[in-house]
Image (cartoon, helix red, strand yellow):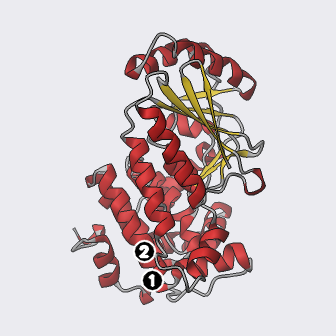
Amino acid sequence: MIKEKIIENLGIIYLDRPKVLNALNLEMIESIEKILKKWEDDDQIRAVLFDSLSPKGFCAGGDLKSIYNDYLLNDECENKDEFYQQEFILDKYVKNYKKPIISHYFGIVMGGGIGLTINSDFIICDESVNWAMPETRLGFVPDVGVCKHLSKLPQALGQYLGLCGESLESSDLIKYKLADLYINSKNYEKVLDILIDLTKNYQGQNLIEELKRKTEEFKAEKISSSLDENMGKIEKYFSFSSLDEILQSLEENKDDDFAQKTLDNLIQKYIFMLQVQFEKYFLCKDLSQDEVFDLDLKILKYSRKTGAMKEGIRSLIIDKESANWKEKSLDQVSSKKVKDLLGIEKFYSER
């Protein structure tokens, strides 16, 4: 499931679970942490690369079937939050790792795979990337610390991505500083050779600066993405100061195909967590990355305890049917519960 390789002074960690597109389980989390700890004090290793041996992409996120069966349905499991706890420990460790970390995004890049790598020192992406955080459909919210990065985006875009779980392409990742180098996939081996060669003579931030300079010639031309094409409508519908206004605006403009599709998307998701995510976007602007990790774990535990996580995974992954959420409309959502969960006294619209 995890393979390690050393070439010159570069340590490579390959995700290798192709049948489930590298969906992360506890064994993979523990293996990655073990390898990183082994390499951190190894003078031969000057940088670490996260990559995938799956032809379909980097990572589909956490292994939701495993979480459902091994934790949520398992009455003998004493710590039902173990996977997320260990995942977050690893993500924090990666963020603070002493040596440069480079990540290679291609194909599917979602959920836990993003959390593992989003704090890398250098992220390479290509034309095949489909990047998304679709957790509001699963009974919780974009987690693994990613909302710290979403909160840095313009309000309408940050809300659109966090609430709807829509995808980004590589040109979007570059434009909004979620990746560092956009290349054509045919040039990846050339970029990798440059990285390997640089590790012979450089380390630390000097290595990253040289990597940026030496790979400049492989930058792919940015192309217009579906996000670019819809940005005007995203700003129109997602710039409001409350979730209620967003939903009302979409409802009032259902003759607009974008508004109708977006509304159809949102009504499939858990309305309680949509309200949580709406407020969380603003809250995360004032939190440190570690504080966002801690908040995410708190929300995941809440989702698990209330049964929302179980229902979300059951409906989307196991039975593939519409979810039966506890709260079905915004007027059924307790403002106090949302505020208590987020640790805030007022909603953004009340300030």
Q: Which amino acid does label 1 sit on?
A: Lys
Rounded to the nearest angstrom, the CA distance separating label 1 from label 2 is: 6 Å
Q: Work out whether residue 252 or residue 144 is closer to the camera in this orientation and state it.
A: 144
Q: In this view, does 43 lie above or below 158?
A: above
SS label for mark 1: helix
Q: Work out whether residue 146 or residue 162 is closer to the camera in this orientation and state it.
A: 146
| Quadrant of the rendering where the C terminus is positioned | bottom left
Asked which quadrant contains residue 14, the reply is top right
Residue at x-position 70% and y-position 35%: 127
Residue 91 location, x and y as percent? 44, 50
Is 344 left, or right, of 151 in this rendering?
left
Q: Work out whether residue 77 or residue 244 is closer to the camera in this orientation and state it.
A: 77
Whether tag 1 and tag 2 are in contact, CB under 8 A, the answer is yes
Q: Is residue 338 above or below residue 200?
A: below
Q: Work out whether residue 157 or residue 72 is closer to the camera in this orientation and state it.
A: 72
Residue at mark 2: 301
Residue at mark 1: 305
